[in-house]
Image: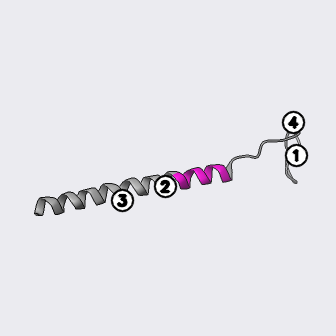
Amino acid sequence: MKKLLALAVIAGGVLFVVKRNKAAKAEAELWRAATAPVPSTNGTTPAKPAGASHN
């Protein structure tokens, strides 16, 4: 009986870790998509922000 309980605890721990890693990976992918630069649709380079230095 103790072995079965220990096996269930280990299986639960493994499931918890796998679920947490999957959630972390999904969160990282969302951040990557949210912070990725937006590609230009008209083929021009993006405008410089106001106050950018002029070289």
Q: Residue at x 67, y 53 (%)?
A: 34
- Residue hosting label 4: 43
Mark seen at residue 47: 1
SS of the residue at dot 2?
Answer: helix
Percent across and percent down for residue 3 are 12, 59
Q: Give above or below for 41 relative to 30.
A: above
Q: Residue at x 46, y 52 (%)?
A: 22
Which residue type carries mark 3?
Phe
Q: Nearer the viewer, residue 23 or 38?
A: 23
Q: Marks 2/1: CA distance?
A: 34 Å
Of marks 4 and 1, the one in the foreground? 4
- Find out whether the residues at labels 2 and 1 contact each other: C-beta distance under 8 Å: no
Q: Nearer the viewer, residue 4 or 45?
A: 4
Of marks 3 and 1, the one in the foreground? 3
- Residue hosting label 3: 16
Of marks 3 and 2, the one in the foreground? 3
* Stretch of the chain drawn in magenta: 26-34
Q: Give above or below for 54 relative to 5.
A: above
Which residue type carries mark 2?
Ala
Which residue type carries mark 4?
Gly
Left or right position of 8 against 14 = left
User: Mark 2 or mark 1: which comes first in sequence?
Assistant: 2
User: Mark 3 or mark 2: which comes first in sequence?
Assistant: 3
Mark seen at residue 13: none
Which residue type carries mark 1?
Ala
- Residue hosting label 2: 24
User: Mark 3 or mark 1: which comes first in sequence?
Assistant: 3
